[in-house]
Structure formats: structure tokens, C-alpha cells
Image: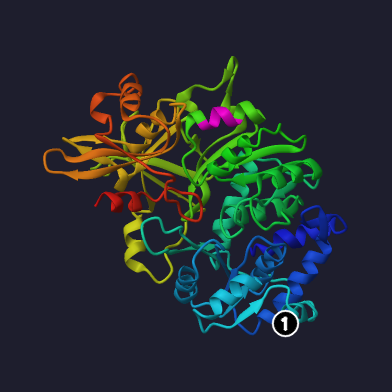
Amino acid sequence: MNLFALLDQTAARHGDRGAVYHGERQVHTWSQLRERALRLATTFGEFGPGARVAVASENCPQIVELMFAIWAAECVFVPINYKLRPREMEQIVADSGAARIFASPKLGAQLAAETAVPIETIGGGEYESRCGAEVSDPPRFTDPASLAWLFYTSGTTGRSKGAMLSHRNLMAMTVSHLADFDSADENCSLIHGAPMSHGSGLYVPPYVARGARQVVPASGAFEPLEFLDLCEHHPGCSAFLAPTMVARLVQTGRERPRNLQTIVYGGGPMYVDSLKKAMAAFGPIFVQLYGQGEAPMTITGLRQRDHVADDGWASDAVLGSVGYARSGVDVAVLGPDGAPAGVDEIGEIVCRGDVVMSGYWHNPDATAATLRDGWLRTGDMGSFDAQGFLTLRDRSKDVVISGGSNIYPREVEEILLEHPDVVEAGVVGAPDDEWGEVVVAFIVGRVSPDDLDTHLLERIARFKRPKRYEFVDELPKNSYGKVLKRELRARLA
């Protein structure tokens, strides 16, 4: 099945209801959205089936119609994060072999100096003329294994790779979200606070399937007060947000808007202390997901009710976990010998299921290293407890081995962030002649090393304590808010 069928079916059921909003303003009904997507699809025939079509823009309403138009034309959606540098964007355009780039005026001007691929301005004259074409017939015979989305990784370890996601992969993601996390309907809304090129955009299919309106902030970005205002205006609001965005909502001091029902957080570590502050501010509306672009938004998760217990919040062990296996996904932890690890034993997290990508675009070596024996090797280290909750320890490359002992930076970061004067913390290993590696902590905040040592030694083993602290104004992050550990290590080198 082609993902365009989700829009086709929703337009038949809810044609006159609002579908896409820019801030508080309605842009399209479902019937209008379907018609515009099919008119665009008619003109995309010039690219040919399977052609990659890149979209480079701040969040805007046209991304939704472009997404479904590209699928209706049986082409491949290649979204590019608007926070990337022009050269990084050009690398994605070149790697994907995109036939055309649809870009906002700002990003189009930047890309024009970097690429020879034709660029059309979203909402410009040429674009709107496409929307006046004849309405094409919806696709009826698409192979579900056909490529639908090239999801370029965030590149925390180097150049981005294009994870090949098929219509089947994204449908499995859609069904899993609706089965596990959210029971949206036509009286609900998806607020696009995070970039639509990645997490927030991936949630377009499940909410379109249920007729929930797509709401794009007028700013085209994440502004906490604007986001909260939109949740007062639109009904039944849900959103995907990175943990750093959740923290910014808490910092506003505002109460939970009456219509805000669900915040799905993921894409980076949500530390227990930060999660408790968010729940204290907004209540038990949070859902955690653990996933990767290679298994989009769907490996494990914690539902809203998993965050609470009879006497209050769930235990720190549960809140510090990434939940249990999602519907339709098999998840395991493998030891160094490739055999399943025992309860509480740490190993590499692997998964398999219809949601897992078919491989990396034009990168057979990376594909062979990541997809082995039918499993996606995530590169993350973790362990299952006796109840089936998975705790994420760290990326395998981030584990610090000091004096023969494994030290997991996330554990140290969690404890550091419990100190009231620590705003952010990033822990890495530094080469050491005696110990092999030693732990170094980068700290944002006003606190002394002695205070940190005292705080840590009351809570974790002495060998895990950082050997030194580096105090910085901010931690380096990529365009999705993930801390760039490689840059921290480079500073030490």
C-alpha cells in the first residue's frame, strides 16, 4: 500500500473538516489537501517513479502537501533539516541524487550557491502553478517495499547516512504509534514544534490516518510560549518534542494548557530529574520513545500510565528506562559473544520487525555493518530488567573503559544533574597512560569541583567519579539538540 492512502481515506471520511493550520488559521480542509497533493503529483510525473525529491524548509504547512504529493507520484521524500549548514544540506542533496529541491526562500538562496540541482521556492509562482494542474489518480499498485522516505541521520559521528524507509516501514511505525501511544481522532491536533524533517514529520502519517489536524506554528520553529498558546486554541493536542524542548516549556512557568494531552519525548536522553520536573509542571501527559532513523520512532517506549504508580510517580528505575518493546518489534540485548544477555547484563541493543529500514542509500558497507543476521545493530548499550524494561546505558563508542572497568557516561550525567547548581553535563573519556581512559565531565553551571566530588561520592562508586571537570558556557549540540560527544573529546585532544 502507498502511504497516500491514509490521506485518501481521511478525505473521504472528514472532507470538510480542517486539516492543516498555520498557527490558528485554517489553511486546508482534508478534501482541499488531497486535491492539492494530487495536482502537485501530476506535475511530479516529470521526475519519474522512484525519483528523490528534496524539501528544505523551516516548518511550514506546504510540507504536509509535498509529502503526500511525492508519495502520490511514487517518488521519494527527502526532507532536510533547516538547521543544517548549506554545505551539510548540499551533501544530502548530492548523496540522494535529488531531481529537484523545494525550498523556503531563505534556504533556497543559501543552497543556490552550493548545488546545481534545480530549486523551486515553496509557495512561489512556479510552485503555485503546479497546484493548478489536473488532478491525478491516486496510486493503486505501489509495492509496499518501495522507497518512501530517505531519512538522513543526524550525523553526530560524521557524515549523515540515508536510511531507506519504505511504505511498509512507515506503515508499521504508524500502526505501532496508534496501538501503543496515542488514540487520536478527528477532534485532535498534532502541533509541529520539532522539525518536520525528522521526528515531528514522521508523526504526520498516524495523525493523518485518524483525521487529526496538522498545526504548524506561525513562527515555523519552536517558541515555547507560542506552542503553549496553540495548545490552548486547538483541540486534543499532541506533540513530539526533544527533551531540551520539554525543559524550555517547564522554564516558562506556565501551567499545562487545557488542551495539551500528550507529549512524546525522545531523540536524546531525558534525565530522571528533568522528567520529574516536567511531570510536576504539566502532569502525567508524557510518553517516552526510543528509536532511531533506521527503525523510525519505534523500538521501545514508556506509555503515560507507565510514568505513574499508585503512590505517585513511578520508580526512578522505571523513569530512567526507555520502556519495553513496542508493538510489532522484537528487541534483544546481545553480549560480546552474540548470545542474548541475561537479566541486568549490559550488551548491544538490537531489534527487528517491519519498521526496520532496508539499508543505507548507496552505502553497502554501512548496511552490512548495521543489519546482521536479520537484526538492526543499534550501536547502543543497554540491559533488560526482570520486568522487561530496557535501560539505555550509552552508545557503545561512548563507554569509558578505565582500569578495565566499564563506565557509562549517562549514569554519571544523571547524578551530576541532580546537583541544584548543574544546568547541563556531558561526560566523556580522555586517553590516559595509566588507566587507559579517565572520566572527564563538562559542566554548565556555577559549582566547585569539590562540591561535585562530594555530591558524586555520596551516590556512585569512586572509580566512576570524573578525574577532572571542564566548565563551559554551553555544551556543543547538533541541530536536533543532541550533545556532540565527539566535539567534547576533540576539545580534550
Q: Name the residue type under label 1.
A: Glu
Give the magenta range.
274-278
The residue tagged with tag 1: helix, strand or loop? helix
Please give the count of numbered marks on the rendered protein.
Answer: 1
Q: Position of residue 437 (x, y in %)?
A: 20, 41
Question: Considering depth in this image, is 233 or 364 the residue closer to the camera?
Answer: 233
Q: Is residue 42 left or right of residue 167?
A: right
User: In the image, what residue occupies the spot 67% across and 58% down?
Assistant: 220
Residue 175 vertical position relative to residue 114 in the rendered view, above or below? above
Residue 104 drawn in magenta: no
Q: Position of residue 197 (x, y in %)?
A: 58, 60
Quarter that holds the N terminus: bottom right
Residue 213 vertical position relative to residue 412 in the rendered view, above or below? below
Residue labelled with disc 1: 126
Question: Considering depth in this image, is 440 or 155 the residue closer to the camera?
Answer: 440
Question: Considering depth in this image, is 355 or 423 the residue closer to the camera?
Answer: 423
Q: Position of residue 270 (x, y in %)?
A: 49, 37
User: In the image, what residue occupies the spot 26% across and 49% down?
Assistant: 492
User: In the image, what residue occupies the spot 64% across and 69% down?
Assistant: 71
Q: Is residue 340 visible?
A: no
